[in-house]
Amino acid sequence: MACDKVVVSSPATIANFGPGFDSFGLCLESPRDRISMRRLPNDKLEVKVIGKHKLPRDPLRNTASYAAIKLSELCGCERIGFSMTIRKGMKPGSGLGSSAASSTGGALAMAALLGMRKKELILEAAAMGEELVAGSRHFDNVSAALYGGFTVVSDLSTRTVIKIRPPLFQVVVVVPDISIETKKARGILPQQVPMEHAVRNIGLASGMLHAMLKRNVRQIGACLDDKLALPYRAALIPGYERVRNAALSAGAYGVSLGGSGPAIFAITGGNASKIRRSMAEAVGEAGLKSESFVTVPGKGARVESRS
């Protein structure tokens, strides 16, 4: 049912999730963007941003409003005027799917206004929002943000997304106080990789899927390695190996980068507070300030209210 006003929340996500470069995504329950949107009686577009994080207020440059506009176009609608207020829950450029959270939230908000429930169109519009900042349509973050849980983009050409409900585990996240642009992080990756690295990632990715389906948290942690992107992107983060070793010594099952970084995450079945302190201390020893938090796998973007 269509409505005139809607409030949605859209979560942080971890793209790549170990060996699944551009394919695996994990939804986090928190932090979340909160987006309020209401129809305007004309075709005027307004964007407001609340909080300490600076985002474009031009509707055609902001990923949330841009995805909303694209969703209405995909539905064949004439231009719909709206006012959108965004309260960011995560820092842009943190490696936690900030742009995907905004894009997914904006597309979902417009879908709610229109009374449209086709998730494949919401997903496409969200990816178009990602394209605005990344230069191409990436589906790993937006798939996890929209569907929740653990997602696999198994066939990009057909937009085929596999959705798996992960077991319950704790995710410890530390975000060093540096920013890494997605375009830069992609630009440093080689166009060709050694055969043994490709084979290693295929094995790890297969093991990850098996572990998710068997709900084996320790095995999930053991499969969080990567030979395609992590070795290159970790070099952009001072003290990455120090932080990784600190987390493992404190009892983490596995450690990796969130997306292209700088977020570093660990998973565990318990002892999250100790792991968090150890990781934060290691970042400090590398000469950086950081923010940190503990969360769990989440259920995806949702409509909080409509009227």
Image (cartoon, helix red, strand yellow):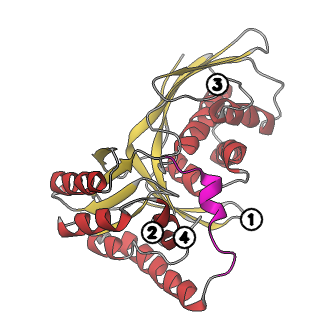
Q: Secondary structure at mark 3?
A: helix
Secondary structure beneath disc 4? loop
Placement of 11 over or under 143, stated as above or below = above
Which residue is under mark 2? 18
4 or 3: tag closer to the N-terminus: 3
Image: 43 above or below 25: above
Q: Secondary structure at mark 2?
A: loop
Report the residue marked by disc 1.
Answer: 157
Which numbered disc flags the more N-terminal residue, 1 or 2? Answer: 2
Q: Nearer the viewer, mark 4 or mark 2?
A: 4
Residue 45's x, y, as percent? 73, 18
Circle 2 residues within 10 Å: few <14, some 14–19, many ≥20: many
For image coordinates 49% across by 60% down, the residue present is 236
Label 2 or label 3, whichever comes before in sequence order = 2
Mark 1 or 4, closer to the camera = 4
Please report the bounds of the magenta region as a residue range. Answer: 179-192
Disc 3 residue crowd, few under 14, some 14–19, many 20+, Cα 10 Å = many
Q: Amino acid at mark 4?
A: Ala
Give the Cα distance between marks 1 and 2: 22 Å
The quadrant of the picture occupied by the N terminus is top right
Q: How much space separates mark 1 and mark 4, taking CA atoms?
A: 22 Å
Residue denoted by label 3: 113
> Distance of mark 4 from mark 2, alpha carbons?
9 Å
Q: Position of residue 53 (x, y in %)?
A: 49, 29
- Mark 1 or 3: the one toward you: 1
> What residue is shown at x 68% (from left), y 44% (from top)?
133
Three-letter code for the amino acid on which mark 3 is drawn: Leu
Residue contact between numbered discs 4 and 2, judged by CB atoms under 8 Å: no
Give residue 264's quadrant in the image. Answer: bottom left
Q: Nearer the viewer, residue 195 or 37?
A: 195
Q: Which residue is mark 4?
A: 229
